Amino acid sequence: MSIDAQANLRTIRDVLRYSVTRMNEAGVFFGHGQADAVDEALFLVLRSLNLPVDRADLFIDAFLTHAEINSLIQMIDQRVRKRVPAAYLLRESWLQGYRFYVDERAIVPRSFLAELLKDGLAPWVQDADAVEDVLDMCTGSGCLAVMAADVFRKAKVDAVDISPDALSVAKRNIADYHMTNRVNPVQSDLYGDLPSKRYGIILCNPPYVSDESMASLPREYQQEPKLALSGGPDGMAIVRRVVRGARGYLKRGGLLFVEVGGGRAAAEEALKGVPLTWLTTSDGDDTVFLVKQEELP
């Protein structure tokens, strides 16, 4: 951007307009929580200034310092040219009203399971206070584990991931929410290094992107750890293992919730003989399934 053009940016409104134009011209991809260039610009610009996105009207005509304008221009340039997700640029992501720290060591928090979790997994879980033990498999940033501990106030939560890098991010979020006494990060290849224990609820948002889809992911997703996305030839390699091992880790009457994106057909093909109950989310009925302990193989 030329010095003359940059000098014409004076207010937050100016920078927002500039951001939206650049992102639309470049055709950036929005898949990390924002619906379009306007939402992305509001998030990127206002949060970089430590301002609340939902009160944009109070600040939109505020004048910016030269240092603020320079910083914002550089950030927008990274978003557009290098396709770095906004969450990585800001080191923060929001999920169902919860703020989480995130960096390139973990996948950007996003989950349709979080919608169901915020409602206490009702009506399948009838008494939140009766939940004593929760397992969050493939925890990544720890977002679902933290939410589970917040929703099920009397529960202990084990947050499992194979990646020590992702668990470092999860530990920071667990500490930020003052939950170190209730959420236990565990490095394990799924159930491999878990203690002999049974849970009332198992949550899992695993890698479920097929090999074919991995090859054509938008550049924004390619910035994320491959380990957190790649689900093998049909996308169901990890899902199969999670489901096959779950019965021995669930209490009688326990529930397994698994997110598979839009992979309903692939999941039903991979898990023939297992009665999958598909739950409704804002993404439809093809995203999250439930299996009861007694229905598992």
Image (cartoon, grey):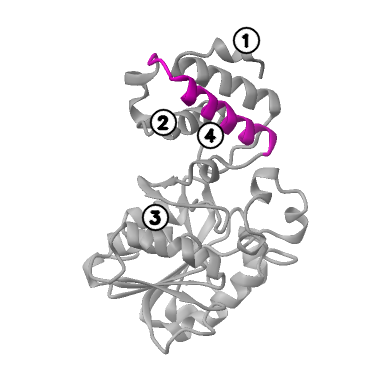
Residue 121 can be seen, yes or no: no
Rounded to the nearest angstrom, the CA distance separating label 2 from label 4 is: 21 Å
Q: Which residue type does callout 3 highlight?
A: Leu
Residue 202 can be seen, yes or no: yes
Where residue 77 sits in the image (x, y, percent)? Answer: 63, 30
Q: Residue at x 66, y 15 (%)?
A: 2
In which quadrant is the N terminus drawn? top right
Where residue 132 sits in the image (x, y, percent)? Answer: 28, 75
Q: Residue at x 52, y 46 (%)?
A: 283
Q: Does residue 128 lie above or below 114 as drawn?
A: below
Rounded to the nearest angstrom, the CA distance separating label 1 from label 3 is: 50 Å
Rounded to the nearest angstrom, the CA distance separating label 2 from label 3 is: 32 Å
Query: Callout 3 environment at 10 Å: few (<14), some (14 to 19), or many (20+)?
Result: some
Which structural element holds mark 1?
A: helix
Q: Which residue is mark 2?
A: 49
Is residue 76 highlighted in magenta?
yes
Q: Residue at x 51, y 22 (%)?
A: 69
Q: Which residue is mark 3?
A: 116
Identify the magenta region. 61-82
Q: Is residue 2 left or right of residue 16?
A: right
Q: Earlier in the sequence, mark 1 or mark 4?
A: 1
275 and 204: which one is in front? 204
Q: Nearer the viewer, mark 1 or mark 4?
A: 1
Where residue 229 sits in the image (x, y, percent)? Answer: 63, 59
Q: Nearer the viewer, mark 2 or mark 3?
A: 2
